[in-house]
Structures are given as C-alpha cells and as structure tokens.
Image (tube, coloured by chain):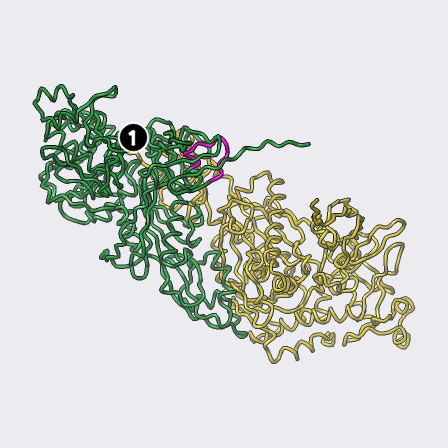
Chain colours: A yellow, B green
Amino acid sequence: MIERFMVSKYKVTFLPEGIEANIPEGTSLMQAAADAGIQMEGPCGGKGTCGKCRVLIKEEKTEKPVLACKTLVQEDMTVIIPLSEVTLLRKGENDTHDLGIRIMPGIWKKSLTVAEPELRTQKSDLTRLYEAFGQVLPLTYTALKSLPQVLRPGRNPVTAVYTDDQILSLEEGNTENQLFGLAVDIGTTTVVAALMDLITGNVLGVASTTNSQNIFGSDVVSRIEHVINNPQGLEQLQWRSVQVVNTLIDELCSKADILPVNIYRVTIAGNTTMEHLFLGIDPRNLAPAPFIPVMTHPIELEAREIGLQINSHGRIHLIPNIAGYVGGDTTSVILATQVYDKPGIYLVIDIGTNGEVVLSVDGKMHACSTAAGPAFEGAHIKHGMRAAPGAIEGVVFNGDIFLKVIGNISPSGICGSGLLQAVQVMLLIGVVTPSGKLITRKEGENMCLSPSVLERLGSDKNGNYFILSYPENNREAVVITQNDVRELQLAKGAIRTGIEVLFKEAGITASDVNQVLLAGAFGNYLDKESAVFLGLIPDIPSERIKSIGNAAGTGARMALISDPLLRSASVISKNVKHIELSGRQDFYEMFIRYMGFDQT
Amino acid sequence: MIERFMVSKYKVTFLPEGIEANIPEGTSLMQAAADAGIQMEGPCGGKGTCGKCRVLIKEEKTEKPVLACKTLVQEDMTVIIPLSEVTLLRKGENDTHDLGIRIMPGIWKKSLTVAEPELRTQKSDLTRLYEAFGQVLPLTYTALKSLPQVLRPGRNPVTAVYTDDQILSLEEGNTENQLFGLAVDIGTTTVVAALMDLITGNVLGVASTTNSQNIFGSDVVSRIEHVINNPQGLEQLQWRSVQVVNTLIDELCSKADILPVNIYRVTIAGNTTMEHLFLGIDPRNLAPAPFIPVMTHPIELEAREIGLQINSHGRIHLIPNIAGYVGGDTTSVILATQVYDKPGIYLVIDIGTNGEVVLSVDGKMHACSTAAGPAFEGAHIKHGMRAAPGAIEGVVFNGDIFLKVIGNISPSGICGSGLLQAVQVMLLIGVVTPSGKLITRKEGENMCLSPSVLERLGSDKNGNYFILSYPENNREAVVITQNDVRELQLAKGAIRTGIEVLFKEAGITASDVNQVLLAGAFGNYLDKESAVFLGLIPDIPSERIKSIGNAAGTGARMALISDPLLRSASVISKNVKHIELSGRQDFYEMFIRYMGFDQT
C-alpha cells in the first residue's frame, strides 16, 4: 500500500457573516480570513505587535481573544471578528456633477459603413476599413484577427475604437455611445474606483473597498519589506492590487449594467509604492535611502499586460509620481486643485497614511512628504480606529467631557478628528501640558481640577491616560494615553515641519497663504480650529482653509475624461520641486519645535 | 469497481529513420507520422485521391503498400516511408555575400552608462536611464519591470534595444554587437529561414524544412478548406506554421551559437494565404470569388502575440500582400529585383505552387496570379516529384532517350525541369502532337518512328503513355502519361496567358522586354530553351532570360537589414496594379490558345 502524506484541512467559520472555509492545518487565522475573502487589518504585517487583528475564538461557554496573525488553525473552529475590523465598504457619493472639463478622453468610437467586397478591385478587408475610417492606423492583433468576421456582407455598420496611434478594436453595429472609463485611487488602506461614461463625462458609479494588500502590513514600508523578504512577495502584492480593482470593476459594471469589455481607459492615482506594486514593479529601492523609485514618468500600458479585466487592449495610465514618497496621488491632487495654473499662494495638504504637502506660489511648486504615519487613521493609537460607526469623532468640554460618536452608538474607539479634538480639550483643561505631558491624577489634584476631570485621569504600567468614555456593558473604556498624545505630536509635528520647510524654500510666511486645501478623507472630518490650535496647520484664518475631499480621486477622474489634463499631470510631476526633508540640517530642529504645543 | 474507458495506444515504428511513437488506436498513419515528427506529402489533403502518401507496412515476409491517409493504426506496426517522401531538408547555401545594401534594420542597440542613484536628486531609475539614453521613449512593460534589477549600482553599462518608437528591452552589460534577425520565406511547400547579423548584415545560416501544414493538403485551397471545415482548423494551421519557423530558429541559433532572445526583428514573405495562416487570420474569404484578403497593408506585431520563440518584444514584419493570390512573396520578389526603381521593361515570373507574373515598364507595375498549379513541383504528375535524388531533371534524344537523374541513381520520378525537357523531346520526335495529343504505338508505327521510340509507347485504361525509364530491380518504370502532358499544358498555358495579358495591359510585345527574371527554385533548374520552345515563356532570346533563385527569400533578407527597403515593400504593394484574370473576357480565348504547342 502506498501511503500519502496529506495536510489536514479544518472547517473555520467566521462570524458574524457565517462564512465557512476549509483551511489547511497550520495556516494563520489572518491568512485563513483572507482565503475566505474577509479582509482584516494588519498594520504590523503579522508581527503580532499591533494587536489590531484581535479576534475571538468561540469555545463551549466562552470566547477566547487571540491575535489572528499569531493563531494557527489546528482544528475545526468558529471565529468571531469584531465588527470594527470587518471591511468597511464605504461607498463614495455618486457625484455626477460636472467637473467643468471638456470631454476629450483620448479614445474615440466611430461608426463606419464599410464597402462590400468586389471582384473588380478585390480590395482587402483592411483597405476597405481604412477607406471608411479615412485614416491609416495600425490595428491591434485582436482587431486584425476580428476583421474577416466583422466585415462580412450585411454586418454594417461596424464601430472602430481608436486612440491617436492605434485602432484598439472593432465592434459589430453602431456602439458609438458605449465608451467607458475607470478612475482609480489606490490608497494604501482603501481603493476607490469611479466608473465614468467617456461620452457624457458622467460618473456612473463609485465603489470602494479595503486594499487587500493590508494582510501584509498597513503601511507602504511593511509592503516593501514583504517584497524584499518573500520571493513571491511582489507577485502576491500585485495580484491583490489588480484583483481589488477587478472586484470594483465587477461591482460597478453589474450595477451600471455595462460590460467590462467596453471599458477602454483607466487612470490610476496612487502613492509611489502603490503604483509600483499595481504594475508588479519592484519597489525595494524605495525603502532605504536614497529612496529611488523606478518611474516618475507617465506610464501607459495595455490592460492585458497586468490582467485588468477590462477590454484587453484598454489603456491604463498611471498618473506620474514625483518622488519616492510623493506619488501619483499627490500629482493627482495638484491636478484636481489646478493650483499649478493659478496666481496666488496655495498650501495643499493630503493627509493619508503619510502626509504630503505641496506649496504653490503662482504655479511654482514645491512638495515634500512627511513621515506623519497613520495616526490620523487610528493606527498606533490605543483605541484608534477609522471613521466608522462607534468612533468618537468629536470631543467637547462643558464642565465635563461630551462625545460625538459616529452612528450615535456607544463609543468603541476614536478616529483622527476625535483625537485632535480630544487633545485640544485636554490641553485647554490642562491635563496635557504644552510639551505634551499627560498629567497624573495627583498632579491634577494639585492643579485643583474638577472631580469629573480628575476621575478620568489614571495610570498603569504603560503610563498615564485620560478616560474619554467609561466601560459600559461589553464595551471597554476609551482612553487617550500618554503614548497617543506622543503619536499625535509626532504626526502633527512632521506635517507642520514639512509646511514650514516649504515656506522657507519659497521665502514666504503663513500670512501670505491665500488658501489652505485639505485633501483626503481625514481632511473632510477635520475640525479646522483644532488643527490650527494644535499647530498641525499654521495660524491661518479658518475661512482660508478648505476641505476638498478625495482630491486624488477627483484628479484621476479629470485625467480620465481629458487626455490634455492627463498630459498636464506629466508636466506637473516634472515641474514640482521635491524637497527631501531627511537630508536637511534644519529638519530636526524644526521638527522638535513643532512637536510641542507651545506655539499655540 | 470503477471501470474506465481508455483508448489503446500502439507502438508504430517508422523506417528508415527508426522513429518510434505511441499512437492512439484509430489514428491515421499520416497523422501518426506527423505526431512522430515526420513530415509527409499530402497534396489531396487526406482525401485518398492523390496517392502521394503511399507507404509500406512491414509484414512478416513482405511489405504491403497502403495510403497513409486512409490507413488507421489498429495494432503495433512498422511502417516504411519511401525515401522520396521523407522530408527533404535541403539547406540553402550560406551566402554571406554583400547584398549591396546599407544596413539600417530599424532596430538598434546602445550601450549606456547610467548615473548612480543619489539622495539629493532622488532621480528615478527611468529618469536616469533617459538621461543616459538622451531621449524619452516608452518602454515595453518587460523593460520597465527589469529596470530596478538592471540599474542597480555596479551594473553599468546596460544596453538598450530600441526602435523608433519604443525601448524593447534592457540587457546587462554591453551587448551592442549582438543583434540578430530572421528572414523567412514561408512557401506552401517549403519554409526557408535565414539568420542574419543585424550589425554586419551577414547571413549566419540558412535552414529550410517542409511546411508541416502539408498534412492538411499541398495547395493553398486545401488549407483554406481545412479552415472552413474544421472549427480548430485555423488554430492548427497557425500552430504548424509558427512551430515550423520555431524549429528553424532553434536549428539556426544552436548552429550559430546565439540565443533566440537576441533575435529582435523578423521579416516574413509568403503568399497571401500563408501570411494569413501564420498570423492565425481567417483566410476563408480568399477561396471563393471575389477572393478578398484580410490585409494587403504591412503588418507589424510583437513576437509574443503569436508565440514565435525570439525576444518576446521582437518585431515581426509581414511583407505586404498585393491581392488574394499575389502575396507578400511577390512583393518580396519585386523588392529583390528592384525593377520598381529601374527604367526598362522587366518580366518577372515566380513559379512555385502557383505562378505569379509581374511586368514592370519603367517601374510602373502590373501583376497577376495564374492558376498554374503545382505541376512543376511534381504534383498531379504520375511520377512527379520534387528535385530530389532519383528525379529525372534532364531528357535528351540522341537516337534514343537519355536521362539526367539527380544523384546519378536509378530514376524514381521526374521533376519540373525534367518534365519540360521530356515533353520538348516528345514533341520533337513526334510522339506528342502540337495540340498535345500523345500518340499510340500504332500511330507511331504509321509515322515510321524508330523501334527504340516505338517500344516506349504504351496504353492502359488511363490512356496513352511514354516510357522514359524501364522498370529495373525494385524500381517501377517512369512514364509520361497523356494526363501529364495535359497538366503541363494547363500550367504553362496559364502562366503564358498571364504574361500575355500583362503585355496587353501595358501595350507592349515580347520583343520590347529587356529582361525576363525567373524566380523560385524551379526557375533555377529550368532549361530556358525548353521553356521558350514549349511556349511557357514568349519568344525572347535566352541571354535576356535570367534565373534569380529564391528572390522572395532575398527580398525578405533585404527588408530585414534595411527598414527603408521594408517601407519600399509597402510602396510596392500599393503601386502594383493587380490584374484579375478570371474576370476577363479575353482570358479563356488566350488560355486555350497558349495551352497548345502550336506557336512553337
């Protein structure tokens, strides 16, 4: 008898969705969840240090908390994934509003009536096609192969789909009004795609989902490390990136009732690492100094090259990167704001997993990337979470602490805007000092703080903390720790230093700025007064500060429906002067200064 | 118990090579031979009518003749394939002589020293590459992906391989002197490829092999029918066409000790059907009137599109077709002769499986295709064979018939040039009448022919015949039948009619012709006097008739090493006026006239 070695498989059930999967023995629960199609947070990249992947294993009478990244499947099991960890499928609004742009997508359809074959002239299919088309353009191999079928008698009209340099495909009948495009913003955390009608310029739908690369770490450095440490890493990350977009294409096309094969143009805005990974281009040289990207020029390629499920000859355009940590997303933000074309001084801040800052002085631009980290997205903050139901998004002091919670439910954590307001309040009531120290209850008593404040102050082995919401039923307390305040200081100090360095490079001061534009999801929720109060933003009147939402996505949409604007993006990426902060002598001094709250 | 249905396999041994193969029950011997890598003739396309695929099955004490196309494998068997049927791997000569052309292959290599990465500027890999290259050209996706590996410190120099519009690849080190190309002549019967050095213009090797599509029929119409009648037919034919060229690439590269990945440019000359099939483009509309090709424009595509085993981004150029039956091979012949650029009147005749005729009057060109059929290649001739050992290639009368046999062995058949001389002799001695009738022995006796001639005359149920060589040991007699004479009349009548129609179109006569150029293998062996005597060629002094060998192959080589000449090929294909013979009122009258031998 021949015995075979087989890996046992176990049934793992994930609650609350009730998704079941057969998982090979020894797989981590985080990988098992990924295999089951469930996306989980993994900021530390499976090192077991961030604690964000905590799940509950259902046992007979109880539930045992474990880290999904460190727990291996050894038996049939039922796993409860906490609500806040489940993929947040936030849908973007369906903004079909006019972007005010002339629609020139650089790709066209033309319905043709092609002459019938005749014996006298014996003109080839291609000759008759060109005569009807009025121009000789190379065909893709696919279009060439389709000719004898498409051009047979009685098949007129046919519709040619073409760019400046190629006929991409030939469609039977008149399909002139069916031409679609996709504008994609690939964030480190979230991927957002807009399906657009390239004839009308209308947005037909917007969908977003978590970037499923997150099982390999929440930040770009973890992902680059994954590439460096795993022979298949680059392939895995590219596959996930492309599949995430394919999923969004499926969803958008089925909702809009169009065929993906009619999508012929895609614009992609992402940070430099995301753009590299989407193309499967090795980003390893981005991680160590001198932080060299493979490409900062515009890249165009056919969908089939990377397996994007649109028309195989559809053109994918990557909005060009500026530098290793100032990516195509920043170029796209600049495009959306159109500051490159405007007189005046504009400060553009995009706060995502990092913080990119652009200063435009009469269209002359400087940009830098600040290692702000993902504090404003909730990472590295003890009870940090993204702006999802249960997140504290506002904190007010009126004799006692009052909270504004998303969804008006019991608070389970705090998001970026909540964190800013919390620390502002804590500064104002004196529990945080201008240097960022969180006082003990004892110190609070010496300062004669009110009992309702005093009872919120506590200490444990990790240091002092401040209770925002007390434990309740199954909910833990939500607290701000000394460490959280430090994380905020690092983040806001980094961004503010970036701003001040750019001011210095351009020889201007805060009072010269005509407008501050805050891009990114966080910018939308941000309380402008808090941001100025805490020194994240220089002292600029709040009426000059404006949130512009997902400007990277807007820029990608503009470039999608306008080829001239796509070309502008190339010009932008070339003209922006990148300022590397880490190489500067004045950086650390400024950084230490702006970490404090003293200037407020 | 589960029983499975399985197809039995049998061992088939092919002699004389001793090749063994396991063949599923019910497979035809012709298919079995193909599966074993042996290429056999199949002019009738497996209909069992041509008898060309006759093989011997070795039995205990004897050998049983059968048709390979009609015999199925039902048991282990040993099959003897007659020598004349075995693939004739005739090697072209290694003509490294200068074609007298400036080498400008439209593809270049440039060795670059790319600047090292640096922190201050953080220039991307692509930016530094472009700075070294001195020009911004799009990269193939492959080249882009290779950048981070190729450009790391210490890797200089790198070599860019590029065309006018794209950088195809980046190679480590200085490989400027390694750039190769392939010129291919895809004939219906034989495929010839020349490996060329694109730096020096030298021919590094020439190889040829049978077009393995021949198992689906020997002529283009059989192959088109195969496409029409079989859902997988087009795919099968394309696969064979590409595989044949891949085999030649393997052979040439291993002999020249170069890597196929260093081949970056290929030119293909073939008749219209062969070019369609090579690209997998449906040729079905070529068969019925109005004989419409898919393309007569130049086609360029990447090797990877069709699986040609050279550099995946190497460029394949098809020499453009002129009409449905005047293909890229004719364009290539015109290019090789350069008549398009010469004052004077030139008649170019390419006799292959069909006969294409081109007339150039001070560079103004007309062309037609004549349905000459493959008589000159031995098909449809009772003992016809190609110019291989054992073929009668010359016939002389000096009191009796004397034969010249290739290889100086016993004759086993007759090739095209032998057929022409045989019929010339038969006309001269009176056994064939000017109308083409082969007389009976009785009629010969009445004409008082000599006994040695009389005894060669015979009759059977298929009509009269004339014995060229008597049976000897195991060899059959070689005879010329009445039907063979008729086949020759049809073939030469067709070509001559084509010539006369072109003369008429151009308003010239035979005496105006400065030069007759005979292209194709047959043209090399052709006895000029016989050709004129029999009326295949008009009465033109033989010093004005010149054989130019495989001019289609020469044209492909010229276009390979000179992109300007490739462009000339496009101009030629556009400027040649195609004359369709079948649609003309004067055609049949002329055809009947030129079938006879009266004009001689």
Q: Is the residue B557 above or below the residue B1 in the image?
A: below
Q: Is residue A376 left or right of residue B361?
A: right
Q: Position of residue A273 (x, y in %)?
A: 59, 62
Of residues A544 and A252, the one drawn nearer to the viewer in this rendering:
A252
Q: In which quadrant of the rendered image does the C terminus of chain A lie?
A: bottom right
Highlighted magenta segment, given as a residue range:
B21-32
Q: Position of residue B344 (x, y in %)?
A: 13, 46
Of residues B253 and B306, the one drawn nearer to the viewer in this rendering:
B253
Residue A466, located in which quarter of the rendered image?
A: bottom right
Residue projecting furthest to the front: B61
Q: Is residue A397 left or right of residue B70?
A: right
Of residues A162 and A286, the one drawn nearer to the viewer in this rendering:
A286
Of residues A35 and A161, the one drawn nearer to the viewer in this rendering:
A35
Q: Is residue A338 left or right of residue B487?
A: right
Q: Position of residue A414 (x, y in %)?
A: 78, 60
Q: Chain of mark 1?
A: A
Q: Amino acid at mark 1?
A: Leu
Element type at marker 1? Answer: loop
Residue B288, located in which quarter of the rendered image?
A: top left
Is B30 covered by the magenta stretch?
yes
Q: Is the residue A515 above or below the residue B523 in the image?
A: below
Q: Is the residue marked by circle 1 packed among few (<14), some (14-19), or many (20+) residues within 10 Å?
A: few
Is A287 covered by the magenta stretch?
no
The residue pinned by badge 1 equals A119
Residue projecting furthest to the left: B448
Residue A387, located in which quarter of the rendered image?
A: bottom right
Q: In which quadrant of the rendered image does the N terminus of chain A lie?
A: top right
